[in-house]
Amino acid sequence: MASTKKSAAAKKVEAPIDQRETFVSLQKNFADSDMPVEEKLKTLYELQEADSEIDKIIQLRGELPSEVAALEDEIAVLKERCASISAILDQFNRNIADAKLSISEHESIIEKYQRQLETIQNSREYDSLNKEIENQELLRQIDEKTILDTRNLIGEKKAELDTVKTRLGFREEDLTAKKAELETIVEETAKEETALRARREECASKIDTRTMSAYERIRASVHNHLAVVGIYNGDSCGGCFNTITPQRRVEIAGNRKLIICEHCGRIIINPEF
């Protein structure tokens, strides 16, 4: 029982990762590892090299992926618009059919009332039937106007539909061309990218979670995504080009310690392992 307690006490308790943790705590964690510091620095450098090559491949694709996505979104909107206009046109045609049926019914009623007029004996009934005939005539005129107005609206909607379809055709042609261009680039770089990503995963698997989190955070915070750099021109940070003190240059050359640039926060190493 005593040995079990001692073993539990000796076991390292890893604190949760704090995205705002200081570089001092990161350096301490970096040194406190089963993997030698030099080996960890070398792995970080190889990881950065793989990521940089992957970045170049992605940069080669340029804006094509976002352009393809934008075209797909626009095409989806245009297709939805075409479907909406087509539905409106179908409704207009149904309205015209209903109006024609209504006109036929009004004419049938008018014809019936006119036959009744021939047999009416008193003026009161005669006036009443004439009034009904006038009402039916008015309703028929309203239906005829509805048909005329709806036909005008159909003409406008058909013109709009033609415009949307024309734009849709152009956008589909653009999408086909952009996709073909993107697929060509992806095909040309597929093997290289697969190998690079495998290399990246291999490096990442060797690095502890805390260091990997810091690496990703630094990469995301700098414009060129270089989290690990060498010494530039013998005395400067390879990321921000600020001068490094002689003492720090000695430490970097030894590859025995994690060195963070005090200006840009990048990890500085000696790539001449």
Image (tube, rainbow, N blue to C red):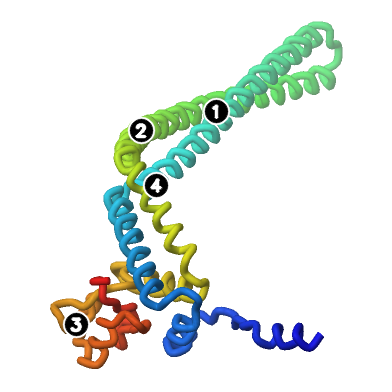
Q: Is residue 249 left or right of 73 when viewed as pictured? A: left
Q: Which residue is mark 4?
A: 194
Quick one: quadrant of the C terminus? bottom left
Which-is-in-front pick, marks 2 and 3?
Answer: 3
Circle 1 Cα neighbour tier, 10 Å, few/some/many (<14 / 14–19 / ≥20): many
Q: Identify which amino acid the numbered label 3 is placed on.
A: Ser
Q: Quadrant of residue 223?
A: bottom left
The answer to whether the residues at label 1 and label 3 have Cβ atoms under 8 Å apart is no
Q: Which residue is mark 1?
A: 89
Q: Is residue 182 visible?
A: yes
Dot placed on the residue nearer the N-terminal end, 2 or 4? 2
**Furthest residue to the left?**
233
Disc 4 element: helix
Q: Identify which amino acid the numbered label 2 is placed on.
A: Thr
Residue at the (59%, 23%) spot, across then down: 93
Residue at the (83%, 7%) spot, across then down: 119
Circle 4 Cα neighbour tier, 10 Å, few/some/many (<14 / 14–19 / ≥20): few
Q: Which residue is mark 2?
A: 176
Disc 2 element: helix
Vertical placement of residue 128 versus 37, above or below: above
Where residue 220 appears, as percent x and y from the top left, is: 39, 70
Residue at the (30%, 78%) spot, across then down: 268
Q: Which residue is mark 3?
A: 236
Which-is-in-front pick, marks 2 and 4?
Answer: 4
Task: Give how far apart the Cα atoms at labels 4 and 1 are.
Answer: 51 Å
* Between 169 and 25, the one nearer to me in the picture: 25
* Between 118 and 58, the one nearer to me in the picture: 58
Task: Give how far apart the Cα atoms at labels 4 and 3 are.
Answer: 34 Å
Task: Give how far apart the Cα atoms at labels 1 and 2 are.
Answer: 30 Å
